[in-house]
Amino acid sequence: MAGSNPNAKPMNLTLNVWRQPNRTAPGKIVEYHVKDISPDMSFLEMLDVLNEDLLHAGQDPVAFDHDCREGICGSCDLFINGRSHGPEKGTTTCQLHMRKFSDGDTITIEPWRASAFPVNKDLSVDRSAFDRIIQAGGYVSVNTGGAPDGNEIPIPKEISDRAFEAATCISCGACVAACKNASAMLFVSAKVSQLALLPQGQPERKTRVENMVAQMDKEGFGACSNIGSCAAECPVGISLENIAILNREFLAAKATSNNLA
Amino acid sequence: MSWITKTFTSSIGRKIIMSLTGLFLCTFLVVHLIGNLQLFKHDQGAAFNTYSHFMGTNPVIRTIEWGLVLGFGFHIFEAWALTRRNKAARTQGYAQWHAEKNSEWTSRNMGILGTIILIFLLVHLYNFFWRARFGGLPKVGGANPEVRDLDNLYLAVVDSFHVWWYVLLYVLAQISLGYHLWHGFRSGFQTLGLNHRKYTPLIKYVGYAFAVVVSAGFASMPLYFFLFTNPQGEIAANAPSLLHTIASAF
């Protein structure tokens, strides 16, 4: 196999996995053992092996969220050994490799924990609260008609870079999972500052931040205590500066918008 | 609800109140610390008693005092309201939780630190503020006409700071205050949106220095009186002169 390490020895691992049959039933941690795990496998491939074993044994496989397995889509969402997306910095679960673990390790795997992210089944959580926050204001108005010239709107390089950094958020929810308060402020702030920085985001600038924060509160996320766990665990490195931008956008909008409701 | 109540009951609105009251209380700490340096003047409390008489009777100070009450009140109330919201945001906890790998202990324990400070505050208010304001203190007496008719708060300080468990409570509370400010100072600016790559590092280190100076300054008072004064408030010859030198500058 190209790129594989011929000296890497297969690992035997103990897994403590959260099992929960559905949204309403109570769940519990169940212990499993997986054998001959290649260090070159991704974490999700290791779970695939576990599920193969479970299927062969006639048991219910572990449900977990995944899609692209390339670190782009933000679907995977495991809380591994007490950290969002596991021990490695700047990595989604699908890009976490088993070489980060050692033979004989016990690995605890839990779903994101937040009242706003109900568990669907096992490790799969419902993150549609994020969708509703985006629907509340994470968009821009676009004129119909001919496409405008891309260079017609002047945007300084520095501003476009900062907006792009915020736009790299993949909405995985690791920030919420890692936050002591289960706050979604880093996620909301990435979306708000991305659009507040750019000229295209100006028409809805005030209503956007007002509506998105209102929706965030309605979904039952906590408030930010500036702890910084979110940014430290974010797989794409969204910075805390965005939360400061969100705070001042909110304050400015509340003080100056025409919205009395 | 009007837009005003909606703003200040939202999560960010409550944080803004936390931050504004917190930073206001920081200015109070500065005034309180500098004022209390009078304790180190080595004058048997003459300057301190004059100062406490002024603080207890001056109409401007008495008015600002109500601002202080509101500042503490809102800071404590919002802390309670936010903690409730934050607890409700995660009802099912994790089996394994390693926040120590991604954040500072003090930033995650502001509520515990604040509660210790609150307990201290109640004891402290009863012991000094209540007795100074609502009687129970003897007059200074003696020959000096400038101070003999003043309440002798200095002696109450000397008495209290000769009780070992009282000194211990003060020092523990000041350590808590130091950690509280360690996170709280810079956090206050961040909540107001005052984050800038030029100034944020400065705010951070000013905050750290503020936390250390304020907590060490307040903690030095009970320790100094416990270690270097007799029950009459006379300063021992081996008392360190640094605090006296600082106090003399004000």
Image: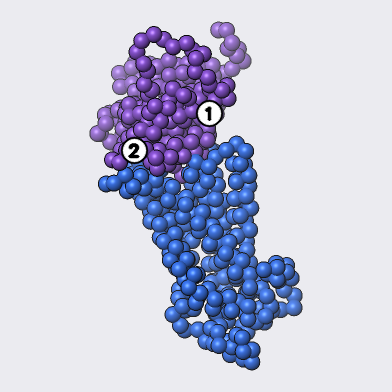
Chain colours: A purple, B blue
Three-letter code for the amino acid on which mark 2 is drawn: Asn
Q: Nearer the viewer, residue B137 or B97?
A: B137
Q: Within 10 Å of the Cα at label 2, are there few (<14), some (14-19), or many (20+) other Cα atoms?
A: few
Circle 2 sits in a helix, a strand or a loop, which is it? loop
- Kindly identify the residue that appears in the image at 54 percent across and 71 percent down: B165
Q: Which residue is mark 1?
A: A237
Of discs 2 and 1, which sits in the foreground? Answer: 2
Q: Residues within 10 Å of mark 1 (few under 14, many from 20)?
A: some
Point out the image quarter for the N terminus of chain A. Answer: top right
Chain bearing mark 2: A
Q: Is residue B46 visible?
A: yes
Residue most extreme to the left: A24
* Residue nearest the viewer, comparing B78 with B248: B248
Which residue ends up furthest to the bottom in the rendered image?
A: B143
What residue sits 44% from the left and 33% below the top? A189
Q: Amino acid at mark 1?
A: Gly
Residue at 26% across / 29% down in the picture?
Answer: A22
In the image, is B209 to the left or to the right of A220? Answer: right
Q: Tell me where residue B83 appears, x and y as whole percent.
A: 39, 49
Looking at the image, tell me whether mark 2 or mark 1 is earlier in sequence order.
1
B248 with respect to B169 (left or right): right
Q: Residue at x 51, y 22 (%)?
A: A164
Instruction: Give residue A103's position: percent from left, percent from top.
Output: 54, 25
Q: Position of residue A69 (x, y in %)?
A: 45, 16
Please give the residue where the numbered disc 2 appears in the rendered image.
A258
Q: Secondary structure at mark 1?
A: loop
Q: Quadrant of residue A27?
A: top left
